[in-house]
C-alpha cells in the first residue's frame, strides 16, 4: 500500500489551535497501522520522524502577507513543495488528506496533478467562524473553501450538524460527506473503503 | 520541445507590454518548431481554448472566486491556472512571465519536477521606488521567490540584470539578457486625420507616448515646455494615468496650457499618424526596464530624445540614433529639445541611424536566444538527478 499523505498547517510543536492536538491524538496510532506521511509548516525545509511519522516540514518562503487569504495561498505553495517531495521520494501515494481550507488548496493542486483522490477534513467553515459572510475577505475565503470542498472526492466531519451545514451552505452532495467520531479505528475503516 | 508558457495577460486581454511580448515570442517560437502552449486569463469574453498563429492558448476565468483586493485575485487566478495546467498534457519546460503568474508556475514546478524559467520584466522596487506597505512587500517577496525557484532568469536589459541581481539577490550567472523584440508593422497605416486639429502649421510636434505615472516622467516634459517658451513647438501627450489631473494643473500653473495637448488613449492608426507628424518623440522615464516605445518611434521615423535610464540608455547612443538627457532633470531635457530643433543634420542622422538600430531587435533573434536557453537548461536537467521518480 502506498502512503496516505496528510497535509496540515499545524502540528505539534507548531500549535495554533485545536487542530494540532486532534492530529497529535489520531495520527501516531494510525501510522502504526498504515504507511502515512505528514506535510506541515515548520521553521525550514527538512525531513524528520515525529511521533513515528515521516514528516516533511516546509519553511515559510514569503514572510509578508497583508491578510489571511493571501497568507493561505502562499502557505499552500510551501505545502505543495513538501508534499511533492514526499510523493516522489515514496514512489507515489494512495490518498491525500488535508485539514480545513488552510491546507486544502495544496490538496487540490496535488490531487489534480497526481490524479490521486483528495479527502478533506472540515472542522469549521468561514460561516461558523465569522458567523456571517459580510466582507469581501469573508467572501474570498468562503469561495476558496467551496472550491476545495467541491474538488475533494470525500469530506470528513465530526457530526451531522456539520454535514447539514456543508450541504445547505456550500452545496456539497450529502453522499460525499462522512461523519466520523474521530477515532483511529473509524479513520482506518474509512481509508480501507478507498485503498485496498 | 514542449513549453508551457504562463502569463496573466495575452491578447485580447492586454494591460501593458507583457501581453504583446508573450504574443510575439510564443508565435515566433512556434514558427521555429517549438511546441508552445500558453496558459492565461479570460474574463469570459474570449475563448477558453483556441489556436492563434500555431500557438495553443488555454484561458482560465477566475471570476468564480470573489476577492478583497488585486493580490487575492491574482492568487485565485493562479490557483485555477495550476489546476487547469494539470489537464493540458505533458511539457518539458515551464516558462513564466513576472510575479503575476509566479504562484502557479512554482506549484507546477514542484508537482511535475520540470525546470522553470522566469522572464522578469520589471520589479516592484523598481516600479515603486521603495516598498511602503505589506502589499508591495508581498509582491517583492514573490519576485524573490520566483527568481530563487527559477532554473534560469531572463531580463530585457543589462540594467534589469543588475536590478534583479541586486534587489532580489539572484546570482548573475542565472540571468541572461535578451532584449525585447520589435515588429515593424505593429502600428499599421496612419489614419486620415487633419494635422491642424492637433497643432498649428508653424508648430513642430513634440510627442510623448506612455502611461501618465510618475515613473514615466511626463511632468518633466511639461516643465521643459515651460522652460523652452518656444512658439514653434506643440507638445502632444498620448496616454492616461493617475497623474493626469496633476499634469493638467501643472500646465496651467506654468503657463503652458495652450502648448500642451492631452490626447488620452488613441488608436494605433491615430498613433501612427502622430508619429509621422512628430518632429521628435520624447521618453523622459525615471524607470524603464526596456523602452519598447522608443523602438516604435524609431520605426515610425520620429527621432527620439530619451532619459539616460534603464533599457533606454542601452538602446540610444547620444547624437547617433537619438539624444539622451540626464534622468529627472527638465533643464537637460529642454536643452536637448533645442538641440534637436536647431540642428537639422543631427536630426536627419538620428532618423537614419535609428532604422539600423531596429535590426538589432527582431523577434526572430529573441526566439533564437530563448531557444538557446531552453536547450542549455534542458541539457542540465537531463544530466541532473532532480526528476519525477515514477
Image (cartoon, coloured by chain):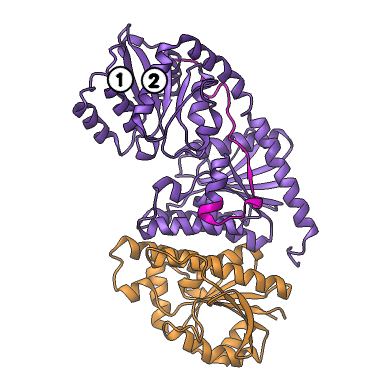
Q: Residues in magenta?
A: B165-190
In the figure, the orange chain has which letter? A
Q: Residues within 10 Å of mark 2 (few under 14, many from 20)?
A: many
Subunit that carries the residue with mark 1? B
The colour one sees for chain B in the rendered image is purple
- The x, y position of residue A62, in whole percent, is 49, 65
When asked about the image quadrant of residue B131, the answer is bottom left
Residue under the point 35% across and 38% down: B213
Comes first in the chain, label 2 or label 1: 1
Mark 2 to mark 1 CA distance (whole Å)? 9 Å
Q: Along the line of sight, which residue is nearer the eye, B219 or A191?
A: B219
> B266 and A177: which one is in front?
B266
Q: Position of residue B375 (x, y in %)?
A: 75, 46
Q: Is there a contact, CB below 8 Å, between mark 2 and mark 1?
A: yes
Q: Secondary structure at mark 2?
A: helix
Determine the residue positioned at 48% across, 29% down. B293
Name the spot of residue B389 as percent of width and height, x first: 75, 67
Q: Secondary structure at mark 1?
A: helix
Residue B182 is a magenta residue: yes
Which labelled disc corresponds to residue B337? 2
Using the image, tell me which numbered label, if any, was put on residue B75. none
Tell me: B255 left or right of B323. left
Is residue A164 among the parts visible in the rendering? yes
Work out whether B93 lies above or below B206.
Answer: below
A195 part of magenta stretch: no
Q: Is residue B292 above or below residue A97?
A: above
Task: Please state the chain letter of the residue tagged with numbered disc 2 in the rendered image.
Answer: B
Please give the residue where the numbered disc 1 appears in the rendered image: B228
* Residues at marks 2 and 1 on the same chain: yes
Identify which residue is drawn at 48% across, 48% down.
Answer: B123
Amino acid at each position: 500500500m502506498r502512503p496516505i499523505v496528510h497535509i496540515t498547517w499545524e502540528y505539534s510543536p507548531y500549535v495554533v489551535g485545536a487542530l494540532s492536538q486532534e492530529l497529535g491524538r489520531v495520527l501516531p496510532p494510525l501510522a502504526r497501522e498504515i504507511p502515512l506521511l505528514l506535510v506541515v509548516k515548520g521553521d525550514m525545509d527538512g525531513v524528520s520522524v515525529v511521533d513515528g511519522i515521516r514528516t516533511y516540514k516546509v519553511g515559510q518562503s514569503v514572510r509578508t502577507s497583508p491578510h489571511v487569504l493571501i497568507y493561505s495561498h502562499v502557505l499552500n505553495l510551501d505545502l505543495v513543495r513538501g508534499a511533492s517531495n514526499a510523493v516522489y521520494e515514496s514512489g507515489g501515494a494512495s490518498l491525500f488528506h488535508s485539514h480545513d481550507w488552510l491546507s486544502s488548496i495544496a490538496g487540490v493542486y496535488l490531487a489534480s496533478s497526481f490524479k490521486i483522490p483528495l479527502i478533506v477534513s472540515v472542522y469549521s467553515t468561514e460561516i461558523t467562524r465569522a458567523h456571517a459572510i459580510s466582507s469581501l475577505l469573508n467572501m474570498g475565503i468562503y469561495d476558496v473553501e467551496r472550491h476545495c470542498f467541491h474538488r475533494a472526492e470525500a469530506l470528513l466531519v465530526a457530526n451531522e450538524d456539520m454535514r447539514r451545514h456543508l450541504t445547505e451552505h456550500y452545496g456539497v452532495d450529502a453522499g460525499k460527506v462522512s461523519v466520523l467520531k474521530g477515532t483511529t479505528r473509524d479513520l482506518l475503516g474509512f481509508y480501507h473503503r478507498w485503498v485496498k | 520541445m514542449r513549453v508551457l508558457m504562463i502569463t496573466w495577460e495575452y491578447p485580447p486581454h492586454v494591460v501593458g507590454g507583457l501581453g504583446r511580448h508573450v504574443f510575439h515570442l510564443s508565435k515566433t517560437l512556434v514558427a521555429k518548431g517549438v511546441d508552445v502552449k500558453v496558459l492565461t486569463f479570460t474574463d469570459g469574453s474570449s475563448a477558453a481554448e483556441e489556436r492563434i498563429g500555431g500557438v495553443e492558448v488555454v484561458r482560465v476565468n477566475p471570476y468564480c472566486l470573489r476577492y478583497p483586493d488585486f493580490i487575492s485575485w491574482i492568487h485565485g487566478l493562479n490557483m485555477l491556472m495550476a489546476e487547469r495546467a494539470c489537464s493540458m498534457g505533458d511539457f518539458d519546460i515551464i516558462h513564466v512571465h513576472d510575479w503575476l503568474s509566479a504562484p502557479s508556475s512554482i506549484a507546477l514546478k514542484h508537482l511535475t519536477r520540470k525546470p522553470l524559467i522566469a522572464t522578469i520584466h520589471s520589479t516592484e522596487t523598481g516600479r515603486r521606488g521603495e516598498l511602503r506597505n505589506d502589499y508591495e512587500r508581498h509582491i517583492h517577496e514573490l519576485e524573490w521567490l520566483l527568481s530563487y525557484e527559477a532554473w534560469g532568469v531572463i531580463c530585457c536589459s543589462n540594467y534589469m540584470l543588475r536590478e534583479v541581481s541586486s534587489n532580489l539577490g539572484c546570482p548573475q550567472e542565472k540571468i541572461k539578457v535578451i532584449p525585447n523584440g520589435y515588429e515593424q508593422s505593429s502600428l499599421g497605416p496612419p489614419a486620415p486625420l487633419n494635422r491642424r486639429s492637433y497643432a498649428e502649421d508653424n508648430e513642430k510636434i513634440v510627442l510623448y507616448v506612455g502611461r501618465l505615472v510618475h515613473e514615466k516622467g511626463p511632468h518633466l516634459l511639461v516643465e521643459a515646455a515651460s522652460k523652452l517658451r518656444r512658439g514653434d513647438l506643440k507638445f502632444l501627450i498620448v496616454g492616461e494615468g493617475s497623474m493626469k489631473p496633476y499634469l493638467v494643473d501643472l500646465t496651467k500653473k506654468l503657463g503652458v496650457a495652450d502648448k500642451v495637448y492631452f490626447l488620452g488613449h488613441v488608436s494605433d492608426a491615430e498613433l501612427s499618424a502622430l508619429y509621422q507628424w512628430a518632429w521628435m518623440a520624447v521618453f523622459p522615464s525615471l524607470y524603464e526596464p526596456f523602452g519598447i516605445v522608443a523602438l516604435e518611434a524609431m520605426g515610425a521615423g520620429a527621432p527620439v530624445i530619451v532619459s539616460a535610464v534603464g533599457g533606454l540608455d542601452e538602446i540610444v547612443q547620444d547624437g547617433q540614433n537619438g539624444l539622451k538627457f540626464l534622468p529627472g532633470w527638465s533643464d537637460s531635457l529642454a536643452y536637448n529639445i533645442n538641440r534637436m530643433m536647431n540642428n537639422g543634420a543631427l536630426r536627419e542622422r538620428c532618423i537614419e541611424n535609428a532604422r539600423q538600430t531596429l535590426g538589432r531587435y527582431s523577434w526572430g533573434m529573441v526566439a533564437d536566444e530563448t531557444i538557446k536557453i531552453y536547450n542549455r537548461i534542458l541539457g542540465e536537467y537531463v544530466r541532473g538527478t532532480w526528476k519525477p521518480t515514477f
